[in-house]
Image (cartoon, rainbow, N blue to C red):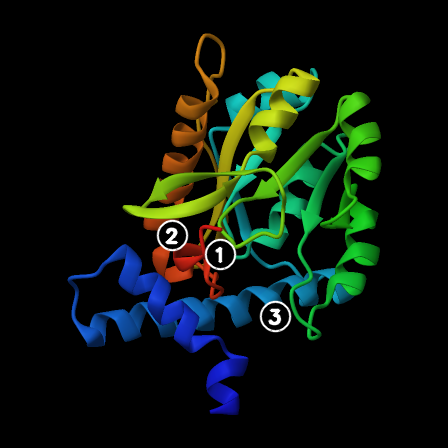
Amino acid sequence: MYNFNVFYIKNRFKNISAIYPKISFINKIYFVLAGRINFFLSRFKTLLYLFFGFFPYQIKIHGKKILDKYLGKNGVIFISVHSGSYPLAGKIFYDNYPNHKIITPFYKFNKYSIYEIYKKLFKRININIVQLGGAMKEIDPVLTNGGSVCLFLDAALPVKNRVVVKVFNNPVPFSTGALWLSKKYLKPIIPIYVQDKGQAIVLNVLPEIKIAGKNDDLVMKEIALSIENMISITLKQWHIADNFLFQDLV
């Protein structure tokens, strides 16, 4: 039972069941195992790059014109999901926009986290990782000076400002951070996600989620729908194994 808990198989199974309640038990197990295997492969690829500079992969960016439009100006509020070799998006950004600073909050939810290692090594490529909780003191100067932030919204996050939205028809407490930051710093909300495709690592950049002329509830629904779509596309490479889709609503 110990190993079962270490690899978060139970939570992963419940999330897959919430996404596809009608598929067979065998198919659910397939998605569970595929996601966990990709998680470990992703970490392995990332650590090989960070420690040894080993990166034999082809880089592809779908939607680069969107990045070119905004990163040369005022930066953006990226929203994303934990899929594929997503930490290596940092290298992709550094190779293409070496002077652009990006900051991303990190939720250290267990004692096995490699947060401190990531924080130190990613600073080499202008990616600043900050621990969730009191992170605004570090996020503010980056956004004020034209940088960007990347928020991973597909997890159960211990944040105060949340609203309940539907994700895969499940009511989920969802962080309002992206909307709040977009309004405060006048930056667009841009969804991005990473896929591993053979010997290529692909960064997919989606169109802006516009907030002008919309009420907050509608924008939050669009943000949640974007996260839902990115999870669906990357489900075999989606890593999350917490209680994201079955959180308490209190």
Q: Position of residue 142 (x, y in %)?
A: 80, 30
Element on which disc 1 rests? loop
Residue 76 appears in the rendering: no
Q: Position of residue 134 (x, y in %)?
A: 79, 44
Residue 138 appears in the rendering: yes
Element on which disc 3 rests? helix
Disc marking residue 196: none
Q: Position of residue 169 (x, y in %)?
A: 27, 46
Classed neighbour count for the residue bearing mark 2: other residues with Cα under 10 Å, few (<14), some (14–19), many (≥20): some
- Marks 2/1 in contact by CB < 8 Å: the verdict is yes
Q: Name the one closer to the observer, 213 or 27.
A: 213
Classed neighbour count for the residue bearing mark 3: other residues with Cα under 10 Å, few (<14), some (14–19), many (≥20): few
Q: Position of residue 156 (x, y in %)?
A: 53, 55
**223 vs 114: above or below:** above
Residue visible at 34% across and 41% down in the picture? 166
Q: How far is disc 3 from disc 2 in space, using C-alphas?
A: 19 Å
Q: How far is disc 1 from disc 3 in space, using C-alphas?
A: 12 Å
- The earlier-in-sequence mark between 3 and 2 is 3
Element on which disc 2 rests? loop
- The earlier-in-sequence mark between 1 and 3 is 3
Residue visible at 47% across and 62% down in the picture? 239
Residue visible at 83% across and 49% down in the picture? 124
Q: Is residue 77 left or right of residue 168?
A: right
Mark 2 highlights which residue?
Answer: 234
Classed neighbour count for the residue bearing mark 1: other residues with Cα under 10 Å, few (<14), some (14–19), many (≥20): many
Residue type for callout 3: Phe
Residue type for callout 1: Gly
Quarter of the view holding residue 20: bottom left
- The earlier-in-sequence mark between 2 and 1 is 1
Mark 3 highlights which residue?
Answer: 44
Residue type for callout 2: Thr
Disc marking residue 84: 1
